[in-house]
Image: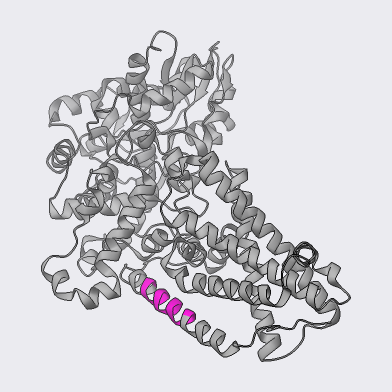
Amino acid sequence: MTRVVFWNIEATGLFYLLSVIAIAVFLVGFYRVARIWRSGWGERRERNVGRSVKRALLDGLLGRRIFRGDVLGGFAHFSLMWGFVLLFIGTVLLTVHHDIVPFLFGTVYLTYSLVLDIAGAFFIVAALLAAFRRFVLRANHVPNRWDDPMMLALLFLIALTGFVIEGLRLSAISHLGMEWSPVGDLFGAKLGGLVDLTTFHGVVWWIHALAALGLVAYLPYSKLFHMFAAPTHLYLSTVPPGIVTLEEREGLRGELDRTELVSLDACTRCNRCEVVCPSYAAGEPLSPRALVQSMKSFVRRKYAPERQLLAAEELKTNPPKIEEAVARDECWYCTTCVACAEACPIGISAADIARETRVTLVDGGRRVPKTIRDALNNVGKYGNPWEHNGPKHYAWLKTLEAKDLSQGDEAELCYFVGCLASNDERNQAVARALVKVLNTAGVDFGILGKEESCCGEFARRLGEDGLFEALVEGNYGAFKDLGVSRLVSTSPHCFHTMRNEYPVMAEKLKIEAAPSLEVRHHTTLLADLLRGGALRFNGRIEKTAAYHDPCYLGRHNGIYDDPRAVLRAIPGLRLVEMARSRSGSFCCGGGGGRMWLESDVEHRISELRVQDAAQAGAELLVTACPYCLSNLTDSMKVAGYGDRIEVRDIVELVAEVI
């Protein structure tokens, strides 16, 4: 028993000619995409190859994240992918058998037939399920384009005609082992007495061949190319986004790095990112999916080889501008919460793309909102995003019962107060609470006093890299002069920047004698003090509390358990979880420089978040971020929950019970 490859087909030469043409068109398309990818700048960080390969295999081939939050969609995609892969492998093996080394005989052939029948059956079911989910259920509110139904119809046609020609062939040349091709045998039994076997087989065979070869040719021009782009993106994105200095950027011609360009082709427009985006949920102009697709169109117009060849002069005199990709200024609405990357099965970050878009706009002085421009100017002039309040600002810091390192005091730990806690009255209460707790626990700490300046986090998120570099150099100078190597901050944004980005900048900027920094967030310090016995709780708080995970503490840095451990240790406090928590937490709307962007939507992002707390039955909404505290406090009043739910920082509760 074996397979007769070209049974009932005489024009095999024509088939091979069409195959060569299809492969040539595919290779041209592949080259086109690869050229666009290479227009991006490469990474400048060392790679753990084993980790990169592992992620590409687990998330790319095994679909580890594809089922999260959408089991039906995950099953459809997984079955389509593996059905396609197995059928493609089967075609390759059949080609080897026919043209190189015959080996499909006996048990090997029967096993081969059964596996392909099962794969084909799953493929057809998955195609129908995907169509039902997309066009009937409208899952995730997926927007449809003209090629979406066409692509599903083409895949379904290839699988269906494959079973039809298999069934007709089996009916015409009956042999033992037909039960090893159960689906094909079923088609043959149904069609055998209805049509002329050889004539109908010949017609359907050519329909199948043309559809399959058409798919091969069209693949690099369609969203199905993500089968190549997705594993590539997963491999590349295991390295955190590289930090490019101004000097390095001068030698770069592209707006995005290579990983980000690959991500544009890896996106299938599944819309999971839009579903979890806080900005989109609030009715703002930003859709992560639309931003990715707009940037994809932009880079195609600017860097595609055919554009370089056919419109070279036009590209020189009137190149496409990045403003065309963000016509509604949507890049400024991104909070950089990376909920999009968390929801995406392959981790595409629209936040990274939005930041690089901002860099280009800021660098060219184009389309930067006035409130953001003013905040950046204030940081450059005064060291904080607000207008100058020099003596008043320092006078407030002096009221803290802490050593002042700027006055010659020495301490083992530096409390980096941060801009918001230094300038906002509500957050000043948090600073006082932390000082009280640290003093009670016997921690030897001090503050930078008049030497403290903005860490530069919001400047970097807004794309003002020159200002960020200046702040990094200035702060490293202060740390060196004052003997600071260990820091704690109540801001996840300061914590993230100084912990993850400062060391990279110190190396790139070649900052002499830059101290090696150990940076902690106050929630992890509180948890350690509690575990070590330095903190003991004497009071009680008889209330129900919900903890809001700040994006830059949770999703960006993976700190979820320590804050909850501290809250559970407070006598009398009942901790409940909101529907959206931990890695699925909903942003407060303050990150990514959004504290300084005016939005005229009906409901602010933070108003949507306080509704989660109300639905959870919380009396206290506890957080660990100055942006979250400020936004949630304001929105609690606006949403009408001000008399029912109080917003507190975790350290304020600790200070109450020690």
Q: Which residue does the image show at 23% across and 68% down from the upper left?
A: 253
Answer whether residue 360 is visible to the viewer in this image. yes
Q: Nearer the viewer, residue 347 or 526?
A: 347
In the image, is residue 30 part of the stretch drawn in magenta?
A: yes
Q: Nearer the viewer, residue 373 or 417?
A: 373
| Colour basis | one colour
Q: Nearer the viewer, residue 46 or 359?
A: 359
Q: Which residue does the image show at 41% across and 34% down from the upper left?
A: 587
Q: Give x and y (percent) for residue 444.
A: 41, 33
* Residue 317 shown left or right of residue 305 in the figure: left
Q: Give x and y (percent) for residue 278.
A: 39, 35
Q: Which residue does the image show at 33% across and 16% down from the upper left?
A: 638
In the image, is residue 57 part of the stretch drawn in magenta?
A: no
Q: Quadrant of residue 271?
A: top left
Image quarter hosting the N terminus: bottom right
Magenta-colored span: 22-33
Q: Give x and y (percent) for residue 624.
A: 42, 30
- The count of marks equals 0
Residue 383 vs 615, above or below: the answer is: below
Q: Give x and y (percent) for residue 19.
A: 52, 82
Answer whether residue 502 is visible to the viewer in this image. no
Residue 23 vs 138, above or below: the answer is: below
What type of secondary structure mainly makes up the magenta span? helix
Q: Quadrant of residue 533?
A: top right
In the picture as drawn, the residue positioned furthest to the top comes out as: 643
* Residue 457 shown left or right of residue 166 in the figure: left
* Residue 11 shown left or right of residue 422 in the figure: right
